[in-house]
Amino acid sequence: MVTRDSVATAGSAIGLVSLLFGWLTLKPNRLAAGTSLNLWETTGWGGTAIIFSLWLICFVLSLRGKERRPAAALSITANLIIIIILILAGLIASQLRQEETSLIRISLGSGIWLSLAGAYMVIFAARQRLPNWPVWRNLASWTGLAGIGVLLITGWLNDLSILQEFAGRQERFVQELGQHIILFSGSVTAGALLGIPLGIWAVRSKRVASPVFFITSITQTMPSLALFGLLIAPLSALSFAFPVLREFGIRGVGATPAIIAIIIYSLLPIVRNTFVSLTQIDPAVTDAGLGMGMSRFQLFRRVQVPLAAPLVLEGVRTASVQAVGNTAVAALIGAGGLGWFIFQGLGQAAADLIILGAIPIITLALVVDTLMRNIVRLSTPKGLAGGNQ
Amino acid sequence: MNNRSIKRWVFLSILLGVFLWLISNTQLWEIILSTLFPQETRVLHPRSLPVLVWEHVRLVVISSSITITVGVPLGIWVTRPSGRDFLPIVNDITSFGQTFPPVAVLALTVPMLGFGFLPTTVALFLYGLLPIVRNTIAGLRAVPPDILDAAYGLGMSRLHVLFRIEIPLAARVILAGVRTSVIINIGTAMIGAVIGAGGLGSPIIAGLVQDNIAYIIEGAVPAAMMAIIADQFWANIEETFAYSTISSNT
């Protein structure tokens, strides 16, 4: 019987190979080109030996990775690797910055990123072998992430370049994060308030359904930058013709076209899912409700809404995740949000500033996705659980 | 091909014809835009419209072709016995990878690969892989097992089953993935203009910087048309394919 776990073996192999790549990148200042330092040049031979032997242990364990005990050991080792790599990186960054001028920037090199990717593969594979050990499974999934969280909060990693970039712009960051959240959540809420009634209307009348789906699916295919552009022209003409509008903040560029575009993008997933959720309700269920003497309103409120809710919310989830990304593009037309850092960073060719925008945007998208998935799960009636999605 | 799909192809050809005629008629744009925006001294981007469209198409075609040639075999491999171990992790990566906003992926390639055509192509390729791999897996796994049993029972080899049974039955879902991937690529390539990849994003960015709405329209209208044409093209291929599979089954 084969007990080798190929995914964990591949992950460990990636981890071992990663040690040959540049470990940390050193730049004389935030805009200069970097020189890359090897693992042994940064951590010394002691650190290299520790990381190398941990990866070697992973590799050996992975050869029996389909069994439970080796899998549990694998998951611990991989989590340890993540934490140790980052502890060492933070430590070395502080040392280097004390020795040299404080202008130098130290960022994680491709070796560290590869190692982290390898660790993810190992943890993912090991986790699957622990289905009946919930404690181990949770430990395996969360230890590394929790470790990163602790290192970030305690300031251990503060000498890494991304956090330095953050330190200089803390206020701006909080402001743009807030703007991002307000823009995307406000627009998606408006999209839902429009889209759900539209979906219900489309179910009731065929004449409404086809043009609604035609228009929303056409706008959905349009590139976001093009849709922003197409909205800028009429809006600026409007604000030019009626200067009063400008007092309300309605201008060609800025938040207004962004909000309108994101509402338009939210419509398709929400309308489509509302439509599908209502049409897929078994007529026998509605008949039963009517037979019990429910009024139309009661039927809607007590039968149709609970049955349709999970799928409708699933549409809102799709729309929200998409909106987080489109809001990032909206920074180009002056709407603000976390995309501002990306485009500022691209303009100045400042890598750290780009990353300061990109990573929080990805994190925000993942958080919104997880949150909405849980809301969908909670809204699913017990009788439907497991069936619907 | 039946009547319905012939009609769709005719409609698409007309749309494509109109598009080509529009982008090759630079003078028409100049006349319309300068009537709409008399205050602007320049209404057309210094690089001509056909060149911008060509840059955009080239970017999307190159990245999408690499995506398809890598993504479909990858999806097939993880559903074969040799790659089955990797199926869960590939599923996991494609599902959370699709949560990543494309702009963020594009932005992150710059610190690694710098500015220009290459990092944009790499970002488009990576991001475009997700829907294709995902749909290839979904399509292949949706093939009913009894059909496969019947095929093996007839003495077909694994390769035969793959090419004669599984891929034709999964084609529709795989093509839907390709369609999504191409549309996302066209949209993301717009933003590639910010990192110096050219294309139809360039006049929009220039228009935003110089506050020239004529430029913005010059970029936005052809881009929107291009996306719609590409979407219809893949929808038609999907449709034509689906009909032929059904008719060959009966």
Image (cartoon, coloured by chain):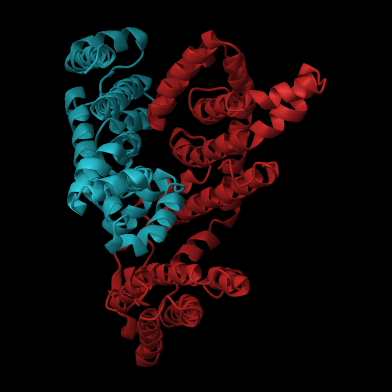
Chain colours: A red, B cyan
Image quadrant where one finds the N terminus of chain A: bottom left
* Image position of A373 with respect to A242: above or below: below
Q: Which residue in the rendered view is the most extreme toward the bottom?
A: A46
Give the residue drawn at x 35%, y 69%.
Answer: A114
Give the residue drawn at x 48%, y 79%.
Answer: A94
Residue B98 horizontal/vertical position (percent): 43, 47
**Nearer to the camera, B144 or A328:** B144
Image quadrant where one finds the C terminus of chain A: top right
Side of A47 where A36 appears, left or right:
left
* Image position of B120 with respect to A68: above or below: above
Q: Residue B47 lies in what quarter of the image?
A: top left
Residue B212 horizontal/vertical position (percent): 36, 23
Residue A181 horizontal/vertical position (percent): 60, 43
- The reply to whether residue A106 is visible in this rendering is no
* Image position of A17 with respect to A185: above or below: below
* Image position of A314 with respect to B237: above or below: below
Q: Which residue in the rendered view is the most extreme toward the front?
A: B153
Side of A292 where A318 appears, left or right:
left
Q: Residue B247 lies in what quarter of the image?
A: top left
**Nearer to the camera, A324 or B206:** A324
